[in-house]
Image (cartoon, helix red, strand yellow):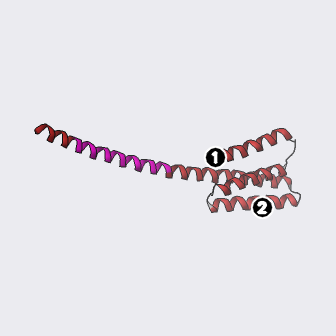
Amino acid sequence: MKSRMLVAGMAIIALAALSGCAGGVNATKSIEFADSNKTIAQEAKVDAAQLESANAKLDSAKALQADGDEKEAYALAEQSTLEYKLAIANAELDAAKKEDEKVEKELRSDVERKLLYQNILDQETKNGGAK
């Protein structure tokens, strides 16, 4: 999934580089970029509240663009992009924390098992030496 996000991000960066940056505000590109991030966020199964907030800003940006308010549309599209990225980062952080907890639990279990086996070995060595 991370590779898919990386590829999508690189494609968008390449598109922006190839098309060149215009001197003025381009709400259309910003909205397209936000839409791409929305797709990634949905695939990442981010927090519903964060997704809803970003979706609301993106919808508002689209409405403002339709009304001809490019600057406000651009600003809201950029905000929604940042919110999508934050939601994705939070989802990745949560997944990493869960994986870390799982690995720590397995490590504790392995340490306990090692101590048990070491105790058994010590007992066998002690009993075998006494015979």
Q: Position of residue 60 (x, y in %)?
A: 78, 61
Does residue 79 lie above or below 17 as drawn? Answer: below
Q: Is residue 62 visible to the viewer in this orientation of the structure?
A: yes
Cα separation between marks 2 and 1 = 26 Å
- Dot 2 or dot 1: first in sequence order is 1
| Residue drawn at x 56%, y 50% as measured from the top left | 93
Kindly report the secondary structure that dominates the magenta region of the rendered protein. helix
Q: Nearer the viewer, mark 2 or mark 1?
A: 1
> Which image quarter: residue 21?
top right
Tell me the element at label 1. Answer: helix
Give the extent of the magenta segment. 99-121
Q: Secondary structure at mark 2?
A: helix
The numbered mark at residue 78 is: none
Image spot of residue 15 (x, y percent): 81, 42
Q: Residues within 10 Å of mark 1 (few under 14, many from 20)?
A: few
Looking at this view, is 62 or 106 the one in front?
A: 106
Which residue lies under the disc numbered 2?
A: 59
- The answer to whether residue 20 of the structure is visible from this angle is no
Query: Which residue is found at the position 32% from the left and 47% from the top?
Result: 113
| Residue type at tag 1 | Lys
Residue extending farthest to the left is: 131
Q: Which residue is mark 1?
A: 2
